[in-house]
């Protein structure tokens, strides 16, 4: 019997298409309403949603020239010492919209007369009720504990907002092709995913990405930890060089997220050095040279703009974590120690 989690992973191109169809105009209206009312962005999120926020740091910086800060919710909810948010746009990202600490950031933002946006799968949630504007995720009910389609819809919601703020038709056209690239990635990954079984006794690994896929490294590592109980550490490929690379010995498992783009030369250089160290390399890329020498290659489609590669690159990571969970005799729909809605103060 197919797991709920697998069904939700495979559903992602469909829900992304629905989100684009249903909310593109809403994103344009929000962008028009907040134009000129902020100079930078503060995003409040936890867990998977926080990884989506990392994507926003690169996306809104690269396309909209905006500085994006990740909020420290405890300053708002526990210490009661919120920072000055003057001239900020406050965005809260939460699949459930329930966590009090995330809601507290938007509450304070409204007190300080900042525009606020909720990105959530629950339109009637406390987070949504606190926001000036809502971008619903249209992911429908996510029944598996581990978030998959609410992650990629969060990325897409942020991408729509960025396109709307930039008022760039070329970017919109690129974004509209994302569902087909995601579907192609699913088909390609399913053809090789059975080879992941060789890693079922793995005790630890590192996940490396940079730029737009810094977020992907964190989300892949989170899925591996959640579903398999394997210690997976995410790093920027640049940060990895500043110390952690000393842990790499022969056979050390490394998941390298390396799609084509401006960041490619750095990742290719690191890849070649890791091969010299005889690391076990699992590679998510469209670069044939990287894939042909990988211990386990996961191909994503060529031609996908770098800023959209996180929507495709996460899929092999999700399916890898799912496959390992099954191989290790774990229930991928009900990871040990986790619950669907986590409310932190």
Image: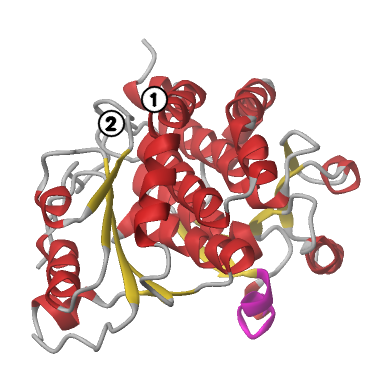
- Name the spot of residue 48 as percent of width and height, x first: 36, 52
Q: Residues within 10 Å of mark 2 (few under 14, many from 20)?
A: some
- Name the spot of residue 20 as percent of width and height, x first: 47, 31
Residue in the image at 19% along x and 44% along y: 96
Residue 8: numbered disc: 1
Residue 72 in view of the camera:
yes
User: Does the segment drawn in magenta span residue 79?
Assistant: no
Residue in the image at 19% along x and 41% along y: 340
Relative to residue 323, is residue 239 drawn left or right?
A: right
Quadrant showing the C terminus = bottom left
How is the model colour-coded?
secondary structure
Relative to 246, residue 343 above or below: above
C-alpha span from label 1 to label 2: 8 Å
Residue 209 in view of the camera:
no
What residue does disc 2 label?
144
- Name the spot of residue 95 as percent of width and height, x first: 26, 44
Relative to 91, residue 299 above or below: above
What is the magenta range? 237-245
């Amino acid at each position: 019997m197919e797991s709920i989690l697998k069904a939700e992973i495979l559903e992602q191109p469909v829900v992304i298409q629905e989100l684009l169809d249903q909310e593109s105009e809403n994103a344009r209206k929000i962008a028009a309403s907040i134009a000129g009312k902020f100079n930078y962005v503060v995003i409040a999120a936890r867990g998977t949603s926080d990884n989506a926020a990392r994507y926003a740091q690169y996306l809104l910086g690269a396309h909209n020239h905006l500085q994006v800060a990740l909020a420290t919710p405890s300053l708002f909810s526990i210490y009661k010492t919120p920072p000055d948010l003057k001239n900020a746009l406050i965005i809260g990202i939460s699949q459930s919209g329930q966590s009090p600490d995330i809601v507290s950031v938007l509450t304070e933002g409204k007190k300080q007369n900042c525009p606020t946006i909720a990105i959530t799968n629950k339109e009637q949630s406390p987070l949504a009720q606190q926001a000036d504007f809502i971008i619903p995720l249209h992911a429908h009910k996510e029944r598996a504990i581990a978030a998959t389609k609410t992650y990629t819809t969060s990325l897409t919601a942020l991408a729509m907002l960025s396109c709307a703020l930039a008022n760039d038709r070329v970017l919109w056209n690129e974004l509209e092709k994302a569902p087909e690239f995601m579907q192609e990635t699913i088909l390609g990954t399913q053809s090789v995913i059975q080879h992941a079984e060789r890693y079922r006794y793995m005790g630890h690994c590192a996940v490396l990405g940079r730029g737009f896929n810094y977020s992907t490294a964190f989300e892949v590592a989170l899925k591996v930890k959640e579903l398999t109980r394997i210690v997976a550490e995410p790093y920027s490929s640049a940060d990895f060089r500043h110390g952690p690379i000393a842990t790499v010995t022969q056979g050390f498992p490394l998941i390298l997220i390396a799609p084509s783009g401006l960041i490619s030369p750095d990742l290719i250089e690191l890849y070649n050095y890791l091969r010299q160290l005889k690391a076990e390399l699992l590679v998510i890329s469209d670069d044939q040279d990287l894939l042909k020498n990988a211990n386990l290659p996961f191909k994503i489609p060529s031609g996908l703009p770098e800023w959209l590669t996180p929507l495709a690159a996460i899929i092999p990571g999700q399916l890898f974590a799912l496959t390992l969970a099954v191989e290790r005799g774990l229930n991928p729909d009900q990871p040990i120690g986790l619950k669907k809605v986590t409310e932190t103060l």
